[in-house]
Amino acid sequence: MSKIKFPVLFSVLLLTSMPVLAVEKHVIGPQQQVATIDAVVAVVNDDVITRLELDERMRTVIAQLKKQGTPLPERAVLETQVLERMIAEMLQAQFAKENGVRVDDTQLDMAITRIAQQNNFPSLVEFMAKLESDGVNVKKFREEIRAEIVSTRLREREVESKLVISDTEVDNYLSNKSKMGLDNDEYHLAHILVVVPEQASAEKIRAARERADQAFAQLSGGADFSQVSAGFSDAKDALKGGDLGWRSGDRIPPAFMNELQNLKPGQNTAVLRSPSGFHILKLVEKRGGSAPVVITQTHARHILIKTSEIVTEAEAKKLILEIKQRIDSGAGFAEQAKRYSQDGSAQQGGDLDWLSPGQTVPEFEGAINKLQAGQMGMVQTQFGWHLIQVLERRNTDVSEQQKRQQARVSIGTFKSEELYQDWLRQLRDRAFVEYRLEEK
């Protein structure tokens, strides 16, 4: 049977809250007996997580860990980890609802269609039929994907839109990269992260350090890294064994790179400190990288009409069509962009400058690649409807400007993760969370 790949971790999925239920058993003697068939294991603001929901998630997580060949942590440890993730997901879902962040069915269908295409299914119908034949609850699958998209949009809005990277940071980054000879090396990493809350007391910092030390002690005693990650790590990828995949040296913080330089594949670092908390890194593999010598860049401009609670998909598309017709009739593209576009490039006439492969979302890049110089085209992305015009193309060596842009992306990746963890901590600090896991 063919395997289907998903861009989300199904061990970290949002489940809707269920009410506490109790049922009276049939009379089997002189006294009636009452059996609780569900119970609340956590209260999260005005919502609850029930025992049935937690048990269902545990079954999913355990099945995934077994499929990965990861030794299972103690059930109580794993249960606590899973509950913490469910609480974090619920807090994000509540925040999204309060702030009007939503994904409608049209946007959801687009996302699932992309997943189908990535798995080589010719149509969405065939993909959903395959899921059903594999025993997947399609309705729940759709809501899981919707929750993942909402989480991504929250991160973009609350974290990535506020990232600031200075020229000095870029200069220092490139200088360190050159000194350490990181131009060609790539590293397959796994990690364990024990988060330290924002403005944590000395006692909480000490407790986090002790927890990290416990994880390190287990690793030193020969424990499997994936098992320890599942039991101790606060990172979202903990239930994947903390696997970070392949990363080029320029995407790893210099402080961590200093430690990795001394490792052989299979070895892990001692406990390391960062603003996010305490880390343990494992070097899984190392290989020489091969950056492309020549890349094809596209000079393009666009006009964006965003969709929202007020502007529907159909209305946005209609407005883009009207703008295109005006341009076809002689109106200037730049003039129309300044007047109508809802993107930050509007004041530059929609000019996006030279774009490199991978710099835009897949739908946008796909539309650009189909256009010849001078042609216009329309495309819908997660941001709304775009009218794109390709101005010219060029093949170019990786320039200093490109290197600086790559440096900004690498710095942004690291800073984004730190800011995201800070935002999650603040969200948690403001919330009312009551644990009832021990109640039977």
Image: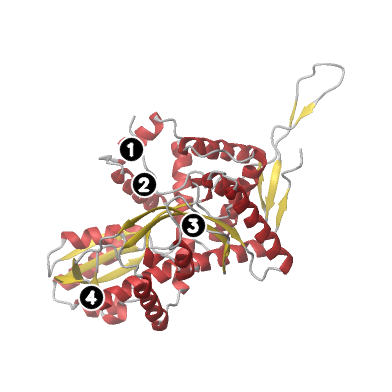
Nearer the viewer's eye, disc 4 or disc 3? 4
Task: Provide the residue designation for mark 1.
Answer: 127
Q: CA distance from mark 4 to mark 3?
A: 35 Å
Residue 329 x, y percent position in the rendering = 13, 73
Which of the two discs, 2 and 4, labels the residue nearer the N terminus? 2
Pointers 1 and 2 in contact (C-beta within 8 Å): yes
Cα separation, mark 4 vs mark 1, equals: 42 Å
Tell me if 31 is positioned left or right of 395 in this view: right
| Percent coordinates x, y for residue 430 in the rendering | 66, 65
Residue at point 68%, 68% (across, down):
200
First in sequence: mark 1 vs mark 2: 2
Q: Nearer the viewer, residue 104 or 300?
A: 300
Say which mark, if any, is on residue 399: 4
**Quadrant of the image containing the C terminus:** top right
Q: Amino acid at mark 2?
A: Ile
The amino acid at mark 1 is Phe
Residue at 68% x, 58% y is: 210
Q: Is residue 341 visible?
A: no
- Residue 74: percent from left, percent from top: 64, 40
Secondary structure type for disc 4: loop
Label 2 SS: helix
> In the rendered image, which quarter is residue 404 located in?
bottom left
Q: Is residue 368 visible?
A: yes
Nearest the camera: 136 or 403? 403
Circle 1 sits in a helix, a strand or a loop, which is it?
A: helix
Question: Which mark is on residue 151?
Answer: 3
Q: Which residue is mark 2?
A: 112
Mark 4 or 3, nearer chain start: 3
**Amino acid found under the numbered disc labelled 4:** Ser
Q: How many marks?
A: 4
Specify which label sits upstream in the sequence, 4 or 1. Answer: 1
Question: Is the Cβ of the residue at disc 1 closer than 8 Å to that at disc 3?
Answer: no
